[in-house]
Amino acid sequence: MTAPARETRVPAACSVDAPLAPLTHCRIGGRARVLCVAESEDDVREAVRYRRGAGLPDDEVIVLGGGANVLINDARDYGLVLKLSERFNAIEVEEESGVARIEAGIYTPRLVREAARRGWDGFQFLAGVPGSLGGAVAMNAGVRELSTWDLVRAAEGITWGGRRIRVEREEARPSYRRGNLPADLVVTIVECDVRGGDADAIHAKARELASSRKDTQPLRWPSWGSTFRNPSGASSTGMTAGALIDSAGLKGYRVGDAAISDLHANFIVNLGRASAADALACIRAAYEAVRDRHGVRLEPEVQLIGFPPDDLAFLEDR
């Protein structure tokens, strides 16, 4: 394990030599030489200063929200991992304008409960989206026809250059499973439009979506969520990514302790001690089987972090 640079002071909100697997939904990850769990924008700024002082390049730095939607190479360590604490979750409401400013560390299940308590309509679909609000905004997470940016009017945060910026929805131009935010932006505040609704109906819809997720997704085992984006445009056959993988006969395919779920083929689950290499082998098997059977090049939805280019070369077959 390489120690942090001696001339660089490790911020108070940081720890040294921390495992990453417990911070991810799939329970796979390497180690952070320095891990910063930020509970405020001041903590984020401290992490930015530490990175600049240590001279860490992009491939040595990871930003984590709630730990969903990521597969981190566990065969290496990382110079700095910045994670927004779930306690970074304050909500301020401007009643007259119908705008809520929400700290980006809030976990989506808590936001759904809070929105229902306040009688806010439209947040219910996030009951089916794991992770944090900041992560959901960065990838424009969603279910079926609904996406996080449908609620969002702007995202604010700190760049790795130390600037605080605001990105309006019209500027970001989010698309399917892409928030299209600047690559160097750490989102800290999300500004959402809020509208009132019937509290009982809101609670009922949130419960319905959470129940549907339990029935259709393999929640018994750790996973990062959906593996591939659903095809669209010229590459679309009208089938979802899960249906394409299922049609290719890959349900239940297993490498080590990683397996393509036999409940939902677009989910890869950790059956116990899966490595990143095991999980990536399942991703590759699904990608190549769908390509060979259907002529469709699936695009990963999961973020593949810390892998050498040769390990991901199969995805360049597009």
Image: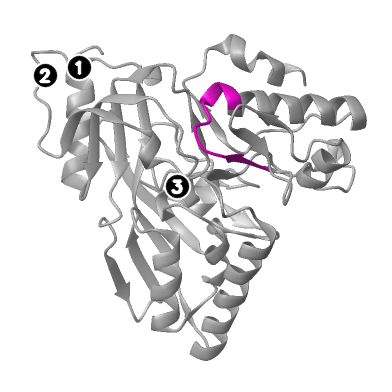
Q: Residue at x 41, y 67 (%)?
A: 111
The residue type indicated by label 3 comes to: Gly
Q: Are marks 1 and 2 in contact (CB under 8 Å)?
A: yes
Q: Provide the residue designation for mark 2.
A: 8
Dot 3: element:
helix
> In the displayed image of the protein, which residue is found farthest to the top?
310
Position of 154 with respect to 269 (left or right) is left
Relative vertical location of residue 21 with respect to residue 210 in this rendering, above or below: above
The residue type indicated by label 2 comes to: Thr
Q: Provide the residue designation for mark 1.
A: 54
Dot 1, crowdedness within 10 Å: few (<14), some or many (≥20)?
Answer: some
Residue 141, position as x, y percentages in the image: 56, 51
Position of 133 with respect to 95 (left or right) is right
Dot 1: element:
helix
Query: Which numbered disc, 3 or 1, marks the residue that appears first in the sequence?
Result: 1
Looking at the rendering, the stretch of residues picked out in magenta corresponds to 267-278
Residue 53, position as x, y percentages in the image: 17, 19
* Quarter containing the C terminus: top right
* Quarter containing the N terminus: top left
Dot 2: element:
loop
Q: Residue at x 76, y 17 (%)?
A: 317
* Camera-nearest residue between 218 and 237: 218
Position of 301 with respect to 89 (left or right) is right
